[in-house]
Amino acid sequence: MSIVELKRITKCYNSTSVVDQLDLKIEKAEVLGLFGHNGAGKTTTMKMILGLLKPTSGELKVFGEDPCHSNFSRHKYKLGFLPENVAFYSQLSGLEVLQFFAKLKKVSRKRCLELLDQVGLGEAKNRKVKTYSKGMRQRLGLAQALLTEPSLLLLDEPTVGLDPVATQQFYQIVDQLRLSGCSIVLCSHVLPGVEKHIDRAAILSKGCLRAYGSLNQLRSETPLTTIIRVGGYFELEHLTRLTQSIDGKVRALTQGGFEFEVSAENKLKTIEILMHETGLKDLDTMPPSLEQLYRYYMEDNALIKDSEFIKSNDCSQRQVN
């Protein structure tokens, strides 16, 4: 059984579809990256998974049950949520804030101290929240989301306000949670940092799912090229002749070495050819990044009229569950 399953989920406000016919699954110990422009429906989707919003139509199951049903309350401690903008009582210390939430969630105070250390706030635990930077408040928010050791964690722009070191530490926590069996939905606009830490990506545009799958699957569905950089003793003319058999391009780099641009299907063939070159000293491959994939799908969507995304007439006729 999937941890989360959305089947043809639609959410309408008045006659406008914010999420339209969305199909998604999240498996145990999987990190799903949820991406899209502002207003794409990401936060609305997360709120429906949490049971804070009821879908207009479609079927939504979390732990096999409807999160809006009264019986779902028995699963509430399995969920953790970090919103994009966290707000706490500014006159309380970080430890007091976490202890307050721990009491609500029936968690021991010892757990609070462990979490504050885990998110890097151990030394600041007795300082008032009003003295915390935005990044520190964000880490405190992550600590409260982890209080109950959730089986499903939803993170909405979790690295906002974090410096590079804190961002790296955050993703280390994400990796540890996945290894422990936690399923995670991670919504972020900072794509370069996310790429290594997700199992699948879902790209939304105006409420519609435009791309869904592992990064390798998404790469195979696009014409985006792979970059292969080599270092060694070569002549550009010789490398140019090599590319004729693989329908690729080669150019000399100003900092030394050469760069091949080839299709995904010709990547292995290119590497095999280069490995037999006696002058080869170094080789590195760079497949299309998450950021390039995102840009490809979003630019492709720009060619489609808004009316194809927002089906107002259909939405107004759907019956609210």
Image (spheres, helix red, strand yellow):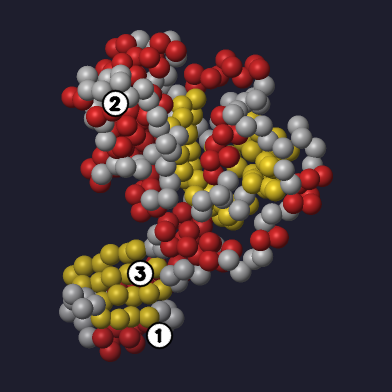
Q: Residue at 37% x, 29% y: name it.
A: 141
Residue 282 or residue 129, whichever sits in front: 129
- Would you name the residue on which mark 1 appears? 244
The tag earlier along the polypeptide, 1 or 3, is 3
Q: Which residue is mark 3?
A: 227
Q: CA distance from mark 1 to mark 3?
A: 16 Å
Q: Nearer the viewer, residue 20 or 293?
A: 20
Residue on which disc 2 sits = 129
Picture coordinates of residue 271 (x, y %)? 34, 69
Disc 1 to disc 2: CB gap under 8 Å: no
In the image, is residue 170 above or below residue 245? above
Q: CA distance from mark 1 to mark 2?
A: 63 Å
Give the mark count.
3
Amino acid type of the residue tagged 1 in the rendering: Gln
* Residue 104, horizontal then vertical, whole percent: 44, 13
Confirm whether residue 2 shows in the render.
no
Q: Secondary structure at mark 3?
A: strand
The quadrant of the image that shows the C terminus is top right
Q: Residue 56: image x %, image y %?
A: 72, 37
Q: Secondary structure at mark 1?
A: loop
